[in-house]
Image (spheres, helix red, strand yellow):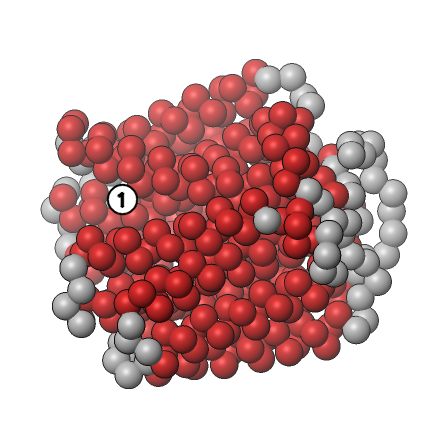
Amino acid sequence: MRSSHTTADFMPDWAAIVAVILGASAFSVAQGVTYPLISLTLESRGVTPAMIGFNAVGFAFGLAASTLMIGFLTSRIRIDRLIIASLVGCSLCLATFAATDSLPIWFLARFLLGFFASLIFMLGEAWMNAACPDRLRGRVSGLYGAGVCGGFAFGPLAIPLMGTGGGFGFALTAVYVALVAFATAVLTLSTRTTPEASSTRDVFTFFAKAPLLVAMVLAFGFADIAAISVMPVYFVKTGHSEAFAALSVTVLALPTALAQPFIGVALDRLPRRRVAIATSAIGAIAFLAIPLLTSPVAILIDFALLGTASFSLYTCALTMLGEKYKGGMLIAGSAAFALAYAVGSGAGSGATGVVMDLLGPSAAPIGVGLALVVFTAAFAAARRP
């Protein structure tokens, strides 16, 4: 259902907003820990790189499965209870990694982890938009983005403290997520809102209704994963140290998290479409500038700007989703965003890697920059929905 451009004003449901941000941030921490920790643990056991990659595919399968089942689940289970159950499910999956070394069980746990994680994000984002008046939507989306990005950045920093052996890191993370599930359950006792159920059909309807919003998330996924997974390889191939490449990921994440609340303020005070176009253009310029920079400090500053602009596309899309839609289309839109991000991230890591192999290291940032230039031009030229 399409809402008017001016959404009715009401008091925000802060309990629901805090519950959503807390849950999404908690899983982002868990994701930041488990992504590298699973790979490092399997590698230390002598598992082949191909099998490690296959194990990671299980997470993506879980994401896709939850998207296809969103209508079935939301029509039968209350949204807040489904979020709490998903947090508990994530905790049990993490505990499974600590309890067994069986690779098939790890694949199943990785699949279920992706399934529950996707539900947390899809349902949480819809709930946050339903609980927030439009006058605060940008700022709340900015806080949400800061929590998600900050949690993902913090996760890897905890690995040296927990180690990669004995399952301690998985067990500690499982306890943390379980505590967040309990806190979320307590917060839901005070909530006043809940998003409406959706259907799988609504998800595909949303693609037709809001192609520009879907394209915005697709562009974000493309640029985000290219920056995280391919650009560190670019730095090593262009003569920088592995330590510099690792530092670049931290420099990418932390300023991005800190900047999102300010992007949220801009979204509430300026035309949101123009903010989205500006962030896309800045991201394009930042990617294109990387091969021209020689100073490590300048490269890291540009990389921080690149990450901030790229992630801001998602903050813009999430804000504009809540501005334009309501009811079951909120969940449908969040599910469509999840699919768009999966496609964009897959294309971002695959295409830029191939381009780098064929045309040399500099082709990677230039290719992503040109892709963002095309998106920016198309978004600016399209009629306002």
Name the residue located 30 percent from the left edge and 48 percent from the top edge.
Answer: 229
**In this rendering, does residue 273 appear at all?**
no
- Vertical comparison of 219 with 85: above or below: above
Image x and y of residue 6, in percent: 83, 35
Q: How many marks?
A: 1
Residue 383 occupies quadrant: top right
Name the residue located 41 percent from the left edge and 55 percent from the top edge.
Answer: 59
Question: Which amino acid is tagged 1?
Answer: Val
Image x and y of residue 246, in percent: 26, 58
Q: Residues within 10 Å of mark 1 (few under 14, many from 20)?
A: many
Left or right placement of residue 266 versus residue 357 in this view: right
Image x and y of residue 130, in percent: 76, 50
Residue that label 1 marks = 230
Q: Quadrant where the N terminus lies?
A: top right
Name the residue located 67 percent from the left edge and 72 percent from the top edge.
Answer: 184
- Vertical comparison of 177 with 305: above or below: below
- Vertical comparison of 128 with 42: above or below: above
Q: Say which element carries label 1.
A: helix
